Image (cartoon, coloured by chain):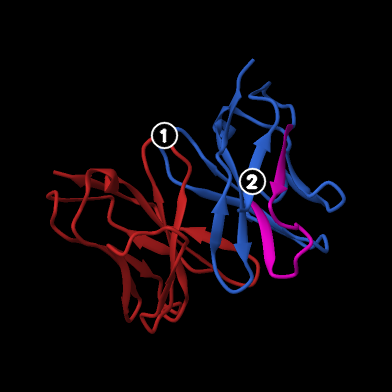
Amino acid sequence: QLQLQESGPGLVKPSETLSLTCTVSGGSISSSSYYWGWIRQPPGKGLEWIGSIYYSGSTYYNPSLKSRVTISVDTSKNQFSLKLSSVTAADTAVYYCARRTRAGGIDYWGQGTLVTVSS
Amino acid sequence: QPVLTQSSSASASLGSSVKLTCTLSSGHSSYIIAWHQQQPGKAPRYLMKLEGSGSYNKGSGVPDRFSGSSSGADRYLTISNLQSEDEADYYCETWDSNTQVFGGGTKLTVL
């Protein structure tokens, strides 16, 4: 059974960089059949796609966040990571990592991690 | 890029059926979507992939009570024999070559 687990600081100061890692178990991140991505959900609001990465390193970002987002993959550790720079209170959200099939949508979600931006 | 439109809320009685709608924007009516369920305080859960033809493939462990259908730009999620645990937010999702998009979600209340 595939599992995805987010990890990283739960509190980030304004103007700093948010960094999260997703560890994949029960399957290989190097499969050519999948993309690996980040989605966030501000408190009480809907889902927002942040970006995705293919095992080869090709990345795709939400245009509204593109200037601040970097997603990378470490196939040796079966992990992928998110960096979001210059954060503000508006970036406070539950951050989810997820797997998307090449022919379809997301089929596995992580449990999510709450990141609060506050001084 | 495609836009997905969902009603903000829906309600139905325990044991009845409900049909939720996700509408694709103009020019994107052939797109495949996915439906996800998010119970209160939990992560989203993948329900199914739904094509414009109405063909759908459900995720592992998704009850038979959940089904999908399509008509033009509309994609439907039907839940039969509603249970209390079906009270949740339901999101549709679609994608193209380099983006992903979510609908705003429908909050389903089971009366």
How many numbered discs?
Answer: 2
Mark 1 Cα shell of 10 Å, populated few (<14), some (14-19), many (≥20): few
**Range shown magenta:** A18-37
Residue B76 seen from this side = no
Which chain is disc 2 placed on?
A
Kindly indicate the quadrant of the structure image that contains residue A6: top right
Q: Residue at x 67, y 23 (%)?
A: A14
Which chain is disc 1 placed on?
B
Which color was chain A given? Answer: blue
What residue did someone put label 2 on? A4
The amino acid on which the numbered mark 1 sits, given as a three-letter code, is Gly
The label on residue B41 is: 1
The amino acid on which the numbered mark 2 sits, given as a three-letter code, is Leu
Measuring from the top left, give residue A115's x and y in whole percent: 60, 29
Q: Residue at x 20, y 53 (%)?
A: B82
Measuring from the top left, give residue A26's x and y in whole percent: 68, 52
Work out how far the residue at label 2 is from the one at label 1, CA to CA, in angstroms. Answer: 18 Å
Q: Residue furthest bottom?
A: B53
